[in-house]
Image (tube, helix red, strand yellow):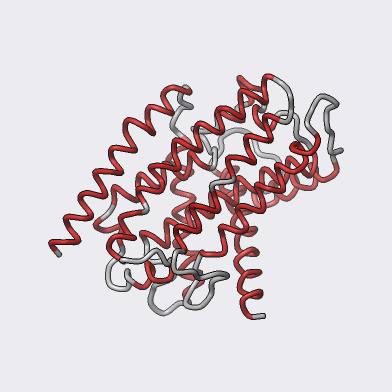
Amino acid sequence: MSEIVQALVVFFGLLVGAYVIAVVKRWIAFGPRYGTVLALPGAEALVLLRQENLVTSASDRLLFRSAPLVAVAVVAMAALVVPLGPGIIGFDPSIGLFYFIAVLSPFVIAMFCAGWSQNAKVGLFGAFRATAYLIAYEVPLGFAAIGPVMHAESLSTMRIVEAQSDLWYAVWQPLGLIIYLVSAVAVSYAHPFDAPQSESELGGGVLAEYSGARLLLFKVALDALFVLLVAIAVVLFLGGGNGPLLAAPVWFVLKTCPLAAVTLWATRFVPRLRHDQLLTLSWKILLPASLLNITVVGVLTLLL
């Protein structure tokens, strides 16, 4: 029963984090705001819940309806290996980080099915963009996470946090942290990597035909995915819940929220790149940089 309670705590924290990310996105956005920023995501959620869940006659109904459920389920399962503190973790396997990356991989299937099932050009273009970005940026994201694993000599997220009791990995692996955060923004389709669902050129893209509760599920899944990736960044590079005086979950929140806010704020001022530029950034810049980071971390680990 204790494991079930811990899993529910992790899921609740994921939902709260998704709401906080939605608030931060609106807080750093420019332009007129109607109502309180804290209440805007909740108001938008109520509006979407009141909308009808339309399904076009030409779409594949099974794939169309199941895609948002798969997206939410994948993020929820991946969140089980996030340690909020000593013993506060839903699932603690010895290969926790590998489990996280492996379970998160089907998210690309959910996004592709969402666009493919619409049987429309806009959704199809968005589906191929979403698939290309997710595959391209999952590679440097995974390589950036290898540095902490090499030094901690373990794939367990709890063990990686314990290995940073004296010094955070972000202090001597800043390149790995930067590569990871850039890849995290791309994997969660946040600006400036939001071309798969861009309204200016694709009219919503991969989510063009979605409305009502299904659209809300996708929005929650994307925001939850971003906060989950930032939480794993805290585990890998910022010592997780390690900290003096305060409880471990409090320290974890105090590290995760500012890191997510700073990341979104920094990328807010970057113009949206073209499709070829986004793929070039991944395969020709981030991937070689992540391999260089692995080499440097390996040499420093052997020397020190």
Tell me the quarter of the picture where residue 153 sits. Answer: bottom left
Judge from the rendering whether residue 94 lies leftward or rightward of residue 169; answer left or right.
right
Residue at figure coordinates x 40%, y 63% from the top left: 155
Task: Say if 204 sits above or below 42 in the image.
Answer: above
Q: Nearer the viewer, residue 150 or 38?
A: 150
Q: How many numbered marks appear?
A: 0
Q: Residue at x 66, y 69 (%)?
A: 8
Q: Which quadrant would the C terminus be assigned to in this image? A: bottom left
Residue nearer the viewer, 262 or 13: 13
| Near-viewer residue (26 or 124) | 124
What residue is drawn where x is 29% and y is 47%?
Answer: 175
Quadrant of the frame with the N terminus: bottom right
Q: Residue furthest left?
A: 303
Q: Is residue 231 above or below residue 272?
A: below
Against 125, residue 46 (above or below) is below
Query: Percent x, y for residue 38?
Result: 65, 52
Left or right: residue 283 compared with residue 200: left
* 33 shown above or below 162: above
Residue 195 location, quadrant: top right
Place of residue 97 in the rendered image (x, y in percent of width and height, measured from the top left): 45, 59
Residue 126: give x, y in percent of width and height: 61, 27
Q: Residue at x 17, y 58 (%)?
A: 300
Q: Position of residue 159 (x, y in %)?
A: 38, 71
